[in-house]
Amino acid sequence: MSFQTIRFALKNAFRKKLIAGLSITGIAIGIALMVVLSSASAGFDNLLDDTIAETLGDIQVSEYGKEITISQLPTNITDIIMTIEDSDMIEAISPEIYVLGFEQFMPNITIEQGGFGPSMPFVPINVAGIAIVDDAQFEGPSTKIVDGKNYENNFEIIVADYIAKGSDGLFAVGKEVKFMTNFSYSVNLTTVGIFETDEDDPTTMMSTNIQMSVATGLALNSLYLPYEQTGYNYVSIRFDSDSVNQTKKYGEQLKLLEPKLEVSITGEHLESVSDLLKNFAIMQNILIIIVIVAGGMAIVVAQLMGVTERMKEFAIMKATGWKNRTILFDIVLESIIIGLLGSIVGFGLGAGLLTLVQMGASQTFMIITWQIVVQVLCFGLGLGMVAGLIPGIKAARVKPMEVIRSL
């Protein structure tokens, strides 16, 4: 296995440049697909893991059997919740109002390219009425003011930075907007602050993007609904929990309270998403294997063709003292060179596609991990070794006398 053998393999790997090029291209396409899919999967897994870690002990409760928009919990619901057996495990608790009627502003807001991806004609507006002291326990919007101040009086609101930016000044600090309800009443709301959001987090738009006091939320809902709202719509609770199962245990205690509560465990929903992603990963791996095996077959075919054409050469090599294992090693090494080159080209192609996607969508949830780099190299090495075995064995078994007789 001398350096001369290695140099010989390097030279012969590209003897048929067109065939070698096609083989490399076939592998590169498969590897590029693997890089893109694996990067997306790794990014979503990281995002999901981070979200699960942050919300592991989070539970939301509302009135049993009622939609959250019409749920009404008593004003002393916090005291009721604190009567559960494991109340000492509660780290934060926040009774909140789900504020209705803000859909009227949706057509006035556009998220521009570079914020949360492609331009969107409107975005959902999630509005909540929360006491600042309760919101601070969850490090919510009121703790992230970057312009203006927090709401202190009734009918003052704070707005997410991307909403303010995309509203063309409608929700600028100090500006009033007219909140219409039931085509009969109007209330002036004043934007007093802008809070910062994480634009790299694609789940940001699902969170609260306008916030106000509980009293303001109750007043607006009472105008919007056919009855006066006096209680909270839901309560956010954060437990000191080490697992989703432990959080479920706390949820069972909450279900025993009166009034009866609808209990929603954030981590439980995220586990379902995680299971879905695992199924996606299985399908992804099957697709990658099919494409890469196709690329591997291209190496086998190319090498078999090359070996068939070079039988005289192998006969002379054996006649001059080359051993079977040396010839086998030479052919396998040629295949490994093509496999590794195809993998490197595919990795570059995949990384380039990811860069274009990131530039266009302004998101960073797709990531290339060191595991993906190792996978690429292993696939290239493994494909070359496996694809070179059959041609290599054929070349190693050549019998010089039979070849000479056939000439």
Image (tube, rainbow, N blue to C red):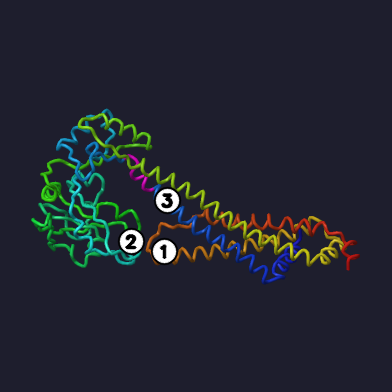
Q: Quadrant of the C terminus?
A: bottom right
- Give the quarter of the image for residue 3: bottom right
Res 46 label = 3
The residue drawn where x is 64% and y is 69% is 21
- From the viewer's perspective, tell me whether residue 229 is left or right of residue 48: left
**SS for dot 2:** loop
Q: Nearer the viewer, residue 334 or 403?
A: 403
Q: Nearer the viewer, residue 27 or 365?
A: 27
Sequence-wise, the earlier of marks 2 and 1 is 2
Q: Position of residue 294 (x, y in %)?
A: 62, 59
**Where does label 2 land, which residue?**
116
The three-letter amino acid code for the residue at tag 2 is Phe
Which segment did they paint magenta? 50-57
Question: Of helix, strand and loop, which mostly describes the magenta segment?
Answer: helix
Q: Is residue 97 above or below residue 305?
A: above
**Amino acid type of the residue that numbered disc 1 sits on in the rendered structure:** Gln
Query: Image quadrant for the N terminus?
Result: bottom right
Comparing labels 3 and 2, the label whose residue is closer to the camera:
2
Q: Where does residue 203 sit, x and y in percent of width and height?
A: 33, 53
Q: Earlier in the sequence, mark 3 or mark 1?
A: 3
Residues at marks 3 and 1, CA–CA distance in whole angstroms: 17 Å
Question: What residue would you read off at disc 1?
Answer: 358
Query: Mark 2 packing: few (<14 Cα in 10 Å), some, or many (20+)?
Result: many
User: Crowding near pointer 3: few (<14 within 10 Å), some, many (20+)?
Assistant: some
Task: Give how far apart the Cα atoms at labels 2 and 1 are.
Answer: 11 Å
The residue sitting at 87% across, 64% down in the picture is: 403
Q: Position of residue 335 (x, y in %)?
A: 69, 61
